[in-house]
Image: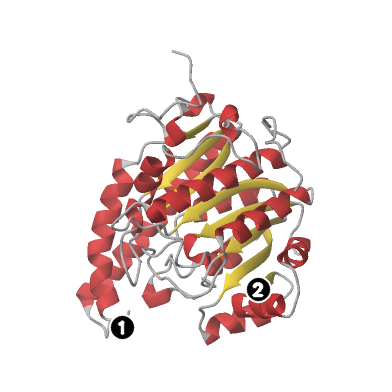
Amino acid sequence: MTFDPNAAAAADSGIYGLPDAPADARVVLVPVPWEVTTSYRPGTAGGPQAILEASRQVDLFDVDSGAPYRAGIAMLGESEAVREWNAEGRGLAERVIARGGVLDGDPELTAALERVNALSGRLNAWVRAEAERWLDAGKLVGVVGGDHSTPFGLIDALAARYPGLGILHVDAHADLRCAYEGFTWSHASIMANVLEHVPGVARLVQVGIRDLCEAELDVIRASRERVATYFDEELAARRFCGESWASQCDGIVEELPELVYVSFDIDGLDPSQCPSTGTPVPGGLSFQQATFLIAQVVRSGRTVVGFDLNEVAPGADEWDANVAARLLYKMIGWTLRSHGEAWLAEPPVRRRR
């Protein structure tokens, strides 16, 4: 049967209603239903499935990037092993989280913490192996989380292939905590772990940060050659004084090297766009600001080599997943364009006023 991009998606179709098998797709998405160390509101393990379901309502023509679906986009099935590790790890981690990570020599809590760290390390190895399998097959690879600890393996794999890589990190949080609550691979430590364990990442550029501790600020100040952080309050103040978002984006993009990885925590957006995420924070980017920033990375001539989208938690309705599915499609479209794969359709007619 011929695929009709204008028709309604079938209930059992792939992401965005597409029929693509991973082997035939240009873009392969790795779902990671994981939220073991989530320390406030749970739910992000359901993010990949919720995004998949919401994606079937997304129209496939995009005014910015044309028709990225034509390149082929496929999401892998969720790993049963990852689900099992998540269930085990979450049960153990909750006991540690309830104590704020203070173990006081309790042997049972110590064993629980050690097991969680081991499971998290196993997940990192699994994500890296999946990433390398599809990168070796010539695919563009993205991770769909789960909490923000999930993309470490993909970042590690890409930095090994592209030393000197830069990360554009959109988030409400700096994620520079060291082993938060004792969890080595905490969702609050993803960028700390990247800086420590992934020397191939040359530059970390953070945007929208508005919730951090003093220890994280110390890391930022001590790492100016490798880390540039654009705090949400400072960006907003500059806009209030007349600076355009376009000008701000130009400055942000100039901090990045030629090869870029985009790591996007959904709570980097204004929480009206993601009210169910685990740790919402007032402020943040609008949907249009976020997608414009990613577009400017590509318009600058830089290449996006991979990406992730995390911390999407299904709420009482489909709003969070709806926003996430559309943001993900934009990210895919601009990633393809950065590789010279525009898949442009005829642009809409623009009438003069």
Within 10 Å of disc 2 (Cα), the crowding (few <14, some 14-19, many 20+) is some
**Residue at label 1?**
102
Does residue 288 sit above or below 53 in this rendering? below
User: Between marks 1 and 2, how big is the CA–CA gap?
Assistant: 30 Å
Q: Secondary structure at mark 2?
A: strand
Residue 67 at x, y = what percent?
Answer: 61, 33
Q: In the rendered image, which quarter is residue 112 located in? A: bottom left
Residue 121 at x, y = what percent?
Answer: 41, 57
Residue 51 at x, y = what percent?
Answer: 40, 46
Q: In the rendered image, which quarter is residue 350 located in? A: top right
Precedes in sequence: disc 1 or disc 2? 1
Q: Secondary structure at mark 1?
A: loop
Could you tell me which residue is drawn at 39 percent across and 54 percent down?
A: 319
- Is the residue under label 2 in contact with that under label 1 (CB below 8 Å)? no
Could you tell me which residue is drawn at 34 percent across and 71 percent down?
A: 39
Identity, as a three-letter code, of the amino acid under mark 2: Thr
Identity, as a three-letter code, of the amino acid under mark 1: Val
**Residue at label 2?**
229
Does residue 268 sit above or below 283 in this rendering? above
Residue in the foreground of this view, choosing between 103 and 317:
317
Within 10 Å of disc 1 (Cα), the crowding (few <14, some 14-19, many 20+) is some
Residue in the foreground of this view, choosing between 248 and 178:
248
Answer yes or no: is residue 302 visible: no
Does residue 4 sit above or below 245 in this rendering? above
Residue 178 at x, y = what percent?
Answer: 49, 75
